[in-house]
Structures are given as structure tokens and as C-alpha cells.
Amino acid sequence: MHAMPQPTSFVGLEKATGTHFRNKELLVQALTHRSAARESAAHGNNERLEFLGDAVLEMAATEYLFHISTKPEGELTNWRSALVQGDHLAAVAKEIKLGAYLFMSRGEEAGDGREKPSTLANAMEALIGAIYLDRGYDAAREFCEKFILRNLQGLLAAGKDRDEKSVFQERTQEKLGVTPHYEVIEEEGPDHDKNFTCAVFIGSEKVASGSGNSKQRAEQAAAKAALKVKGWK
């Protein structure tokens, strides 16, 4: 594992995020991947902070959308999903070069761990959790607005708020009078970094499959592929 850095090691990250940490140990924990914690039990990994940061981000996104739009709940839910999805968080993490500051095992790093979208997304959530504990909710909300929530229009323009699973179900019911169903056909990787492959079926017909780091994301990927297969845009 990398040697534990001195606080000055984080100057670049603090400058990029506009956040100065009072408690550097919180920042260290937010940046510690589970693989590094296995090599050194001196401090914890970032999973608990990720759990906290996920909730803080969801609250910040919900509050932001509530104030900027009068759209109905269903549409705002889709917008929020687009804002907090892993691919978006990973893209933001790359913007602030978060991967360069992560502590991880040599094996994880050798496997391009610093560029892995799921690792970067988790670290973003952990960073939000650390900001919340160190500076309070207002600071965490401001961070979320500045780096994550400001991207809403771009995400909407790219159709990231589109719920392919719902669209595919509507099209299938409308055209065929049946409801599609999903099955997990493969699981790979350790418990903390699993990858799922799901297939979508219409009756006994396997229409398409898709992968993701959660069953829900794999189902969405399968639905997206199925819409293309059927030509149901």
C-alpha cells in the first residue's frame, strides 16, 4: 500500500473541490478503497462514508430539484436518478482527478482501479459524506450543487433521465399485450465489486441482455438493448 500522505498531499484535491478539511483523517478514510484497508488495518475504508454520502447527495438533489422545478414527482424522480447515477458521479470524479488520490492495493491499482467507474463513483459519495461530517450539510450541499447538480441540463439533453425499463415495458404491453421479465444470468467478481448480467424476456424469448454493477443497472442496460433490438425507440 502507498505510505500514508501528509496533509499537504491533499492540497491539489482541496483546491480543485474548494473544500478545506479540518479533519484530514476523514479525507483519508474517504479516499481509502476496501482493498487498501485489507493491507493495513490502521484505518477504515470508505464504505461507511459512501453510505452516508449517498444519502446526503440524494437529499441535496431532491432539495435542488424541488426548488428549481414544478414538474410532477415522477419526472423529478427520473431527473434525480440521472444526477446520482454511477456513470455521472464517475465522470465528475474524473474532472477533479479523484482517482489520483485514492489509496488501494497494488493489485487493484494494476487492474486500472483508479479509472474504474464504480470505484470512482463510490469515492465521490464517500467524499460527500466526509464533507458533511467535517463541514456540515450546507457545505456538502454546495459541493453537490457546484460539481454534480449543475450538470442537470446536459444530462437531460443526453436523455439520461430516460427510464429504459419503463419504456420497454410500456412498448411491450402496448404492442404485444404482455409484460417483460428479467433474470440474472451471470454474476462476476467479489462481493464488494460484483458485476451482474441480466437478460430480458418476452415470454420465453430472450430479447437482449445487459451488464452493470447492480441488478437494477443491469436490467436497465438490458432494456436499453432490447429497445434497439425491437426498434422501439
Image (cartoon, rainbow, N blue to C red):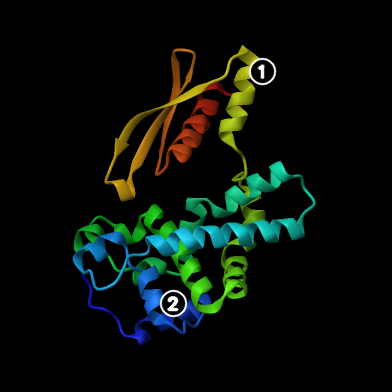
Question: In the depicted view, which residue is nearer to us: 110 or 3?
Answer: 3
Q: Residue at x 69, y 48 (%)?
A: 76
Q: Quadrant of residue 69?
A: bottom right
Q: Quadrant of residue 55?
A: bottom right
Callout 1 touching callout 2 (CB < 8 Å):
no
Name the residue type under label 2: Leu
Name the spot of residue 9 as percent of width and height, x first. 35, 82
Q: Give the numbered dot on residue 203.
A: none
Q: Residue at x 30, y 46 (%)?
A: 191
Name the spot of residue 96 as percent of width and height, x first. 47, 69
Q: For residue 38, say whether it is visible.
A: yes
Q: Residue at x 47, y 82 (%)?
A: 21
Give the secondary structure at mark 1. helix
Is 33 placed left or right of 40 in the picture?
A: right
Name the residue type under label 1: Glu
- Mark 2 lies on residue: 13
Q: Residue at x 56, y 62 (%)?
A: 56
- Mark 1 lies on residue: 174
Is 148 placed left or right of 2 in the picture?
A: right
> Local crowd at mark 1 within 10 Å, few (<14), some, or many (≥20)?
few
Name the spot of residue 197 as percent of width and height, x first. 37, 33
Give the secondary structure at mark 2. helix
